[in-house]
Amino acid sequence: MTGRPRITTLLPGALAGLVLALPASAQELREVPPVPDYGTVMHPGNLGEDLGPGDGPEGTKGDAIPVPSGQKVWWIDVIHNEAGPDGLTYRFRFLAPQIGGRSPLSSDIALKDIEALCNRWVVPRLPQPGPEPAQVMVSLSDQIVPFGDAAPEVVQYFDSFSVEDGNCVWEFF
């Protein structure tokens, strides 16, 4: 039987050849609505007061946000289209001119303000319902810097959080 091919071996191959030779019917294309680009608006229902020009310097949105130190802090933007090391990351960026200059606030004070911003300002503005971020980054800078640009002359503080049960939990990064 070594000289003759077996029918059971040839039959599946022949059937597959016939199926592949038949023309396939094309699936109709359908219109898919574009995903809305919310830009800096993460939770439209809660940002109404924050979208106007406000009392801050050019490039900021809304009025100064109260923080424990009493310094003036303004929202710059949120970046959510650049993944972090653990996946979806929201980066909330704030202007805090008093962390720089001739007599800057200490890093300890700035980091307490960052934690307060995360819990009191960021968490209520996360999309609900929506994708849950793996990480929330909150940053303060004494000048507005385009995202991703190096600016060694600018004082910047960053902190990383996860969000559990509506609270920011500090994460080492």
Image: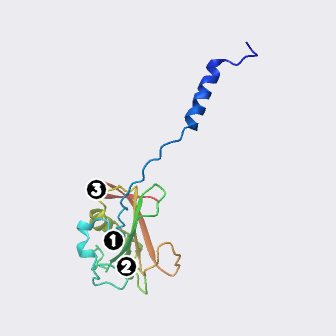
Q: Amino acid at mark 1?
A: Asp
Query: First in sequence: mark 1 or mark 3?
Result: 1
Disc marking residue 96: 2
Q: Quick one: 103 or 92, which is closer to the camera? A: 92
Q: Which residue is mark 1?
A: 113
Alpha-carbon neighbours of circle 3 within 10 Å: few (<14), some, or many (≥20)? few
User: Which residue lies under the disc numbered 3?
Assistant: 129
Of all residues shown, which one is farthest toward the top? 1
Please report whichever mark, 2 or 3, sits nearer to the chain's N-terminal start: 2
* Front of the two marks 2 and 3: 3
Total numbered circles: 3
Q: Is residue 78 above or below residue 17?
A: below
Quadrant in which residue 167 is drawn: bottom left
Label pair 2/1, CB-CB below 8 angstroms = yes
Which x, y percent locates residue 49?
Answer: 23, 75
What is the three-letter code of the residue carrying label 3? Pro
Residue lying at 29% horizontally and 73% vertically, measured from the top left? 67
